[in-house]
Amino acid sequence: MKFEEALKAMKSGIPVKLPSWAGYWWWDEESQTILMYTKDGDCLDIRETQRVEYTIQNILSDEWIVANGQNCPILGGEAEFNFGEAIKYLKRGFKVARKGWNGKRQYIQLASGISYKTPAGDIVNCEHDAIGNKAIAFVGTSGVQMGWLASQADMLAEDWVFANCAGTMKGE
């Protein structure tokens, strides 16, 4: 939903969030403002945000959803997002996974500094003028697959989660 609808929901007592958020926003009738409940359990008045540009970008989103016990981690749920968001999180250094994947210790992450060993034993750094030296690595129970390619199902899925929320070992 667009923010206009999200604000109406908040004013009627319904918490809202963006899909990937662990926290939510809530309308406080007494102070006539939005309170932001963060993933860390903090509560901030929107008027006191330190990240104005980020807050405005969130307001401009048209992906607002109702926050509840299924989709909001601080309410006991799990944040889910689409493939586009998953790519953004990969670029920011997060590990992500599909809830629908069979292996619970599987995830993808962005790999850099990629090199390979030739049959002659030389180590070649795979620097590329156009794309640099990065690739998506699939980390599964049998090892790492470099250059993972998403299936159509993966690209269209809405069940992407942060890897630690998908049953992977923390710190992997």
Image (cartoon, grey):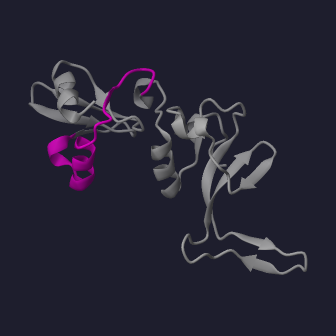
Figure quadrant of the N terminus = top left
Q: Name the spot of residue 60 as percent of width and height, x first.
A: 23, 44
- 56 drawn magenta: yes
Q: Name the spot of residue 160 as percent of width and height, x first.
A: 53, 37
Q: Name the spot of residue 59 as percent of width and height, x first.
A: 23, 42
Residue 50 visible = no
For the view shown, which residue lies furthest in the front direction? 152
- 62 drawn magenta: yes
Q: Name the spot of residue 68 as percent of width and height, x first.
A: 38, 21
At x 61%, y 70%, the residue is 133
Q: Which residues are the magenta region? A: 45-71
Q: As drawn, is 157 to the left or to the right of 114? A: left
Question: Compared to 77, does 42 lie above or below?
Answer: below
At x 79%, y 78%, the residue is 123
At x 26%, y 49%, the residue is 57
Front in this rendered view, residue 67 or 118: 118
